[in-house]
Amino acid sequence: MYASHQHQEGLAHLLYGIQVGGGFVALTGEVGTGKTLLCHCLLQQLPATVDMALILNPRLDAIELLASICDELGIQYPPALSLKSLVDALNKHLLSAHAKGRKTVVMIDEAQNLSLDVLEQIRLLTNLETTTDKLLQIILVGQPELQTLLNRPALRQLSQRITARYHLKELDFSETVTYIQHRLSICSGDPALFKASALRQIFKLSGGIPRLINRLCDRALLGAYARGFTQVDVKIVNNSAKETGLLIPPKRKTPKPEWQGKLLLLGLGVSLLIGGLFALKRFEAMPPVPQPVTAAVVQPPPVQALPVQQVSVVESLSNQQHILLSDALGNALKLFSKTNPSQKPLDCNTIEQLGLACFMDKSTWGKVIALNRPVILELELAPKQKSFALLTGLSGWNALLTVDKEISVPIATLMEYWKGYYLMVWEPPMRGFKALAPMQKHAAIGWMRQQLGVPARAPERTSFFDQTLMHAVITFQRQQQLPGTGVVGVRTFIHLQNLQQAGRYPKLNLRD
């Protein structure tokens, strides 16, 4: 982690609030400034005498929130949920922890999404106390909208109990440069990969928000690699910003009034006249330019032939019988030892009938390779001409593609035709699978527990997606460079499948 001055100060505010105890601590910041990361840093620096309940899904009612807090702290509560039974169970646990000299803290991320009723219930929790001490410390983490929410007259009682506030701002230019250099040093990268002008443009486009800096730098490095450049310049940064939606083309200027146009032409004419006089004086002093003996029509330079590898790529993929997606889907089916059950061209509906599924996405090369699965790449060999090839593996700096046969293509060449779109055939846990979220029940959740080594607290809760499993999912997602949402979507599920060492799922063929 790059700990800027602001992040260090924000962490100090959180630690101070925990040490003081009682009431609330509020940490706010724009999207992507590192609030959630700061929360995880706090978890690593908590004293051994502090118990923490981390709530990452604030879109809950009062009963669901209290149940989540109890789950986080390992508190048993009766099956018939009610506010009274949950508060009584929590109060009993807090009194027991206080008697043992332990502090209890509840941290709620994305707290700007809490409803007024839930916030009022949270405030009432701070009334749990002994004659001398508060039993519960609550940390609210959220976007700037949280500040507006807490300033409402209806929440003035809660606002008065906030003992520490801190707003996490964007990085300035110096911190942005230091942050990028820090990330490069962690991966043993060349500190000169980004030109000074590129760094200034990255700061200008990102506004100093770390998440946007990451997106820009990641895309810019890929763009430089695809073009064979050894440094990232301003042009590559601007192209990357357009691809990631950070750079919007300027609006067309409205035409000026007629009289302004005439003045502009008059000024331009005067400038050209003065410039022409100076040029004439210089021209008189210059030696005459030799004239050609015979006039000739200027011919355009000959078109340079593509390298042999690129020609083979175009020729192999432009063949009409291999341009169709159905052919690429057929090659993918062979990896599952399955064939097309009909004589019709393959599509994703037929794939689902075979117990498999299609997953379509747009991503970076590195994230696609991290899935470690064969994928169908959509290639644009010419404007409005789509070709599809199955990526089956890597061999050094070459990609292994299957069309009518396996061909080896330099990755740098492939990047010229691939715009990030891909399709993957995979085996889902159920038909129509989209995602599994906390508080859901499904048979696949028991399998997820086995993959992550998270046993259920009771046999009847094996198929229940509780807070403990959600934390394990978030940790796993961060290890795999996925967004730490706690929701198991297709990409997270595929990474979980890849934990199995057996060859049930096809993997990329990685050669030296």
Image: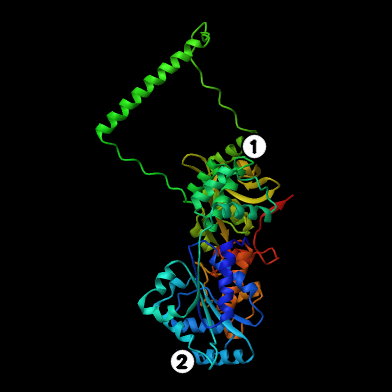
Q: Which image quarter: residue 335?
A: bottom right
Q: Which image quarter: residue 458?
A: bottom right
Question: At which x and y percent is residue 147?
Answer: 43, 70
Tell me which residue sits at (65%, 75%) in the image.
450
Question: At which x and y percent is residue 366?
Answer: 61, 53
Secondary structure under the numbered disc 1 in the rendered image: helix
Tell me which residue sits at (56%, 44%) in the image.
198
Q: Is residue 331 left or right of residue 262?
A: right
Pointer 1 residue: 309
Q: Nearer the viewer, residue 67 or 253?
A: 253
Does 449 sit above or below residue 323? below
Question: At which x and y percent is residue 378?
Answer: 53, 48
Pointer 2 residue: 84
Does 263 sit above or below residue 154? above
Of the numbered discs 1 and 2, the one sitting upstream in the chain is 2
* Contact check, label 1 and label 2, Cβ < 8 Å: no
Is residue 407 in sight in this rendering?
yes
- Residue type, mark 1 in image: Gln
Question: At which x and y percent is residue 115?
Answer: 41, 76
Q: Quadrant of the N terminus?
A: bottom right
Q: Nearer the viewer, residue 172 or 317?
A: 172
Q: Residue furthest right?
A: 512
Secondary structure under the numbered disc 2 in the rendered image: helix
Does 150 sit above or below residue 460? above
